[in-house]
Amino acid sequence: MKPTSDTPINIVGAGLAGALLAVLLARRGFAVRLFERRPDPRRSVAERGRSINLALAARGIAALEHAGVMDQVRPLLIPMRGRMVHDRAGTTALLPYGQRSEEVIYSVGRALLNRVLIEEAARYSTVSVRFDQACIGVDPDRNTLRFRDLGPPEAGSAPRAAEYDVPLGPTIATDGAGSAVRSSLAASGHLSVQEEFLDHDYKELTLPAISGRPALEVNALHIWPRGGFMLIALPNTDNSFTATLFLARHGTNSFDSDVVALFEREFPDTLPLIPNLVTELRDHPQGSLGTVHSAPFHVGNKVLLLGDAAHAIVPFHGQGMNAAFEDCTVLGSLLDQNTDWGVLFAQFSCRRRPNTEAIAHMALENYTEMRDTVLDPKFARQKTIALELERHFPRRFIPRYSMVMFHPEIPYTEALRRGGIQAEILDQLDSHRAADGKLDLPTAGRLITERLPEFD
Ligand code: FAD
């Protein structure tokens, strides 16, 4: 099977990655059948329980630009210049993410972004989008994809057939972290899958606008780090904020304990800002978090997993969607080389797996950093040194956070590898600072030149 425009491609899941991928494929002239379990978001209210807003960074933006949809997405974005850290006393401090004006990340509403991408995909006559269709399994040996029709029967017509099969063809599964396609392939022994859940869950809360004005500084990602747990808040375009509480499932400070009392003790400054705290804590769903490792990402020339379906990660680096969008860019560039589907899927899997494993690792590390390390004076000190080193040695030293968030040309694997070396250099320079606190630049220059080759 060659990737030609004559073969329709099935995409299972019209979430963020699936909808963007449909646009990318349609732009290349492919016919696409996009199946989505949920009702059409253009006609219904978005379902609750998924993160309401997300941080979009350079990798995601590069993919949106590549798909030609950035003009439609831009009005949805709110720039966030740094982390606004709130301590227990209510004092705040902004830790900038980068040092150039363009080094910002953007808060974007999930439902709005998804809707724009679906609208863009649906513009192409070669894309058919079928809502209310839940994939319930895939059988590569019989070449079938099985669906259940969840749609209400149309007035005056016979009830819909409950289950039906679709020829497998080349199929790309973008059905998210709980992927039915992945589970089905793992159950039939076609893939090896490991799912690691955190013992922390999350719950979302609302900080409405106050008399039409935002309750907090808009251009920041707010964090209330408290050691074993934390609260964060991202701005929305209607001047509200969505806060997310990350907390252990069980134990002393946990979702099992009195969470209102925990707010009174740990986040007292947020109490006047979350008027429906008690009802939202009771009614909003408690989401779980985890990392998915699949190997490989494909089955021959038949099925490819992409985005969270292949490699869901914990959200603490704000990279799950960005990595899923980067998957789309990589798949697009491999398609341009026009190899066989089997070769293409295998190349994608080989190229992406090490990178998605690297970001999965960094995302887990960032949880400790966000809830804990940001409170340590050493963290702020080393952040300052790192930015200073970047100013002096821009061709060799870029802080790890910046490599991940602002430099899509640097693969995640390289950010992880160089980041490890840089952490050692930072430790060394931090412990050898002169009494006046000044950085030992000659030593810094020597260490960096010896250990960090220039970027290409
Ligand atoms: P999804 O967006 O989950 O889309 C999957 C789609 O498939 C959905 O539309 C779903 O309805 C559909 N579907 C599911 N099952 C079936 C089925 N059986 N049949 C048919 N359709 C199906 N990432 C960031 O980059 N930045 C962030 O700040 C960030 N914050 C996050 C905060 C939280 C609390 C969480 C949980 C995640 C966060 N993420 C973030 C990660 C991000 O949400 C995911 O990585 C991203 O949504 C992955 O896109 P996707 O298209 O692969 O999956």
Image: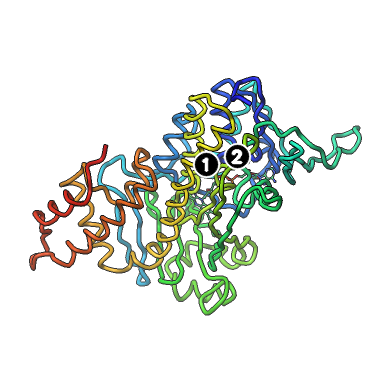
Q: Amino acid at mark 2?
A: Leu
Q: Which residue is mark 2?
A: 304
Q: Position of residue 409 (x, y in %)?
A: 35, 38
Q: Position of residue 91 (x, y in %)?
A: 32, 66
**Residue at the spot x=77%, y=41% of the render?**
147
Q: Is residue 455 above or below residue 26?
A: below
Q: Is residue 117 above or below residue 210?
A: above
**Residue at the spot x=63%, y=27% of the render?**
122
The answer to whether residue 387 is seen in the rendering is yes
Quadrant showing the N terminus: top right
Does label 2 point to a residue whose CB lies under 8 Å from ligand 1? Answer: no
Q: Secondary structure at mark 2?
A: strand
Q: Is residue 280 left or right of residue 430?
A: right
Give whichever of 37, 332 is nearer the camera: 332
Tell me the quarter of the picture where residue 407 sits: top left
Q: Is residue 408 left or right of residue 392?
A: right
Give whichever of 55, 429 is nearer the camera: 429
**Residue at the spot x=25%, y=61% of the render?**
424
Give whichever of 144, 396 is nearer the camera: 144
Q: Is residue 208 left or right of residue 186?
A: left
Q: Position of residue 282 (x, y in %)?
A: 63, 67
Disc 2 + disc 1, Cβ < 8 Å: yes
Q: Secondary structure at mark 1?
A: helix
Binning the other alpha carbons within 10 Å of mark 1 as few (below 14), some (14 to 19) or many (20 upward) gives many
Residues under labels 2 and 1: Cα distance? 8 Å
Binning the other alpha carbons within 10 Å of mark 2 as few (below 14), some (14 to 19) or many (20 upward) gives many
Q: Which mark is residue 349?
A: 1
Q: Amino acid at mark 1?
A: Ser
